[in-house]
Amino acid sequence: MILQHLADGILTGAIVSLGAIGLSLTMRILKFANFSHAELLTFGAYAAMVFLAFTKAMDGVLGGSLGPFSFGLSLVVATVLAGGLTALAALAIDRLVFARLRHRAGHMTLVFASFGVALLLRNLILIGFGPDPYYYSRELQMAIRLPFDVLVLPDQIFVLALTIVLVIALHLFLTRTRAGIAMRGVAESPSLASACGIDVDAVIRWTWILGGVGAAVAGVLYGLTVQLRPELGFSLLLPLFAAVILGGTGSMYGAVIGGLIVGLAENLSVMVIPASYKPAIPFLLILLILYIKPQGLFGEAK
Amino acid sequence: MIGLFSYLIFFLIIALIFGVAVLGLNLQWGFTGLFNAGVVGFMAVGGYATAIMIGREREAVVGGFELPFVIGLGGGMIASGIAALIVGLATLRLREEYLAVATFGIAVTIQLVALNAEWLTGGTLGLIGLPRPLQSSIEGPLAYNSFYLAMVIAIVAVAYIGLERMVRSPWGRVLKAIREDETAAASLGKNPARIRLEAFVLGSMLMGLAGGLYVGFIGYVGPFDFQPIVTFQIWAMLIIGGSANNRGALLGAALVWGIWTSSGYVISKLVPATYQTQGGAFQVILIGLLLVLILLYRPRGLIGEEEHVSHHARPTATGSPLTSTDGSSAATDGSSTATDSPSTATGSSLAARDS
């Protein structure tokens, strides 16, 4: 039983990690807690569903379902398109709202504005798509039996593999490319980076692009393994923040580990408390870490 | 005519109950700069605690102590204060946004408890048939609602006068000093973390009081009355009415509740029944747009904070910000303090309020 919960926890955690990376980057580089980040997951998931309606029509070219998975190349293409659209949406929101407030107001105004943006996005999606859940595919999958009677769906293995690939790709981006190094420089000290000739505005754009793409992929993966609802992002908001705070605000690797811890804790908790209290686990983790190690597991003490 | 009059009484009761919570948020955000993203959670704690204390005994549910309503209200306030203490002790020493995240989290958690802890909260059904204060001695709904309105007005008046005296006291001046510049306040020997905690707990107790008053009025408590959207409504009331001004807080409560209920009425007439969920979304967007317009064009709210000048300061001839005390333009009074310390978080929290 415990191994099954561990497996489920790692899979949930992978999705939380992907979403938390973007949130952690914005908290580090833009210096505010973006409550609307989770709505980008919803946006990406629904965008992929709309694109899927078109790419499905090309199944003749793209082929049907891939091997044991419930989806085919059509969803992969739709996800790539949704990632691009979500990045554009994140840039547009920054241009319309956050950029206007960044220099003339305190950072709690940005937090407040992000609340408003979150509410607006969520309700626009509710108006557009209605409150009922959607699924990318109705196809049934055969669960794979791992050693010790652990059952996983092929889609879940795909989720984990994709998360690992994306985290490695992001690591290479941040350490090997000029844009990535510039991002780390701005995260350390915006004024020093700016004095060294780094284009801070470009770094901010990269932050939104990475955050938006990560959010869209996480949203699609959540939709794939659970379902699409207008509250998809809202229900992940607390796990995302818990992952970021656990890992240490601003640490990308911390966010990944934090996401895994949140996923594991949520899934293992059902062995001790009723499953209906599972959504409270991230809050308890936040309180715990703030009481004992407020800088997070991988954060530096101020 | 009677119908309209009795509706007006009903409307004012609810608006003033919201007003109590807005006064609490004003103490936290308006005067101290504390971002509470879980207002509804503290209202729910107060509401449920009151209900458990005043309710009748029933099977399989803890509580039903049948205590007098006033004691129930007090118990609700204490319960909310304890919830605030738990969150406040963990976060108030740390980065400002941690309080926002933690308050959001406690509201989510409290909603889960309300929904699932059937032994305590009655689960999804809630606790029904709560005795309303003096219900048996007042005949007829109109008379009863008039009595309840009078009681709520009295409570709002006490809260208002108490808060006004507090924010004008030395304690209140320290609150604003911390909001403007924490380092400066600390260097004068004030303890910012402690005073923030006091303001946070006190504000949350007012939210608990609002929850208790609401439960006492409708004679029922259930999880669906304490949805996250209530937090947004209360924030909208404060920002639109005027942050850091207690009269603004009450004005905002009545105004936003008026817009909310009337737009809900119009939407329910226009939108077919199958799309009612989406109708609610339009209501949220309407209030959200109003909020954005206020933030852009009247950042201080309808009646914003009064300018305060020290009794020791003498007006000087030209150019001093102390001479232009009428607050004619939001931009000047916002920037005059913000530019003093643009790099510190607390220095900018004034600008936050103003913009």
Image (tube, rainbow, N blue to C red):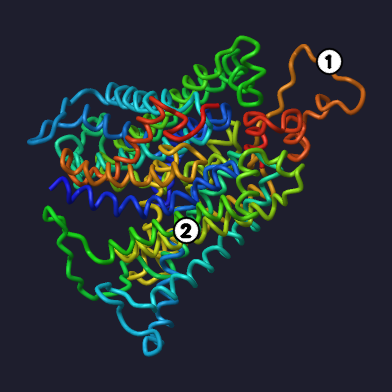
Q: Which residue bears the numbered disc 1?
A: B314
Q: Chain of mark 2?
A: A
Vertical side of B321 occupied by B312: above or below: above
Q: In the picture, which quadrant includes the C terminus of chain B?
A: top right
Tell me which residue sits at (47%, 58%) in the image: A214
Which residue is at the front of the view, B314 or B340? B340
The amino acid type found where label 2 is placed reads: Gly
Image coordinates of residue B188 in percent, x first then y, are: 65, 11
- Along the horizontal axis of the image, is B211 left or right of B308? left
Numbered label attached to residue A214: 2
CA neighbours of label 2 inside 10 A, class few (<14), some (14 to 19), many (20+): many
Residue that protrudes farthest toward the front in the picture: A176
Numbered label attached to residue A215: none
CA neighbours of label 1 inside 10 A, class few (<14), some (14 to 19), many (20+): few
Residue that protrudes farthest toward the top in the picture: B189
The amino acid type found where label 1 is placed reads: Arg
Label 2: element kind: helix
Image coordinates of residue A258 in percent, x first then y, are: 38, 42
Image coordinates of residue B259 in percent, x first then y, are: 51, 53
Vertical side of A291 occupied by B241: above or below: below
Label 1: element kind: loop
In the rendered picture of this protein, how many numbered marks are placed on residues? 2
Which residue is at the front of the view, B174 or A173? A173
Tell me which residue sits at (24%, 33%) in the image: B51
Tell me which residue sits at (57%, 56%) in the image: A208
Q: Chain of mark 1?
A: B
Image coordinates of residue A234 in percent, x first then y, are: 39, 52
Which residue is at the front of the view, B267 or B79? B79
Distance Cα–Cα, label 1 vs label 2 = 57 Å
Residue B300 visible in the snapshot:
yes
- Along the horizontal axis of the image, is B320 left or right of B126? right
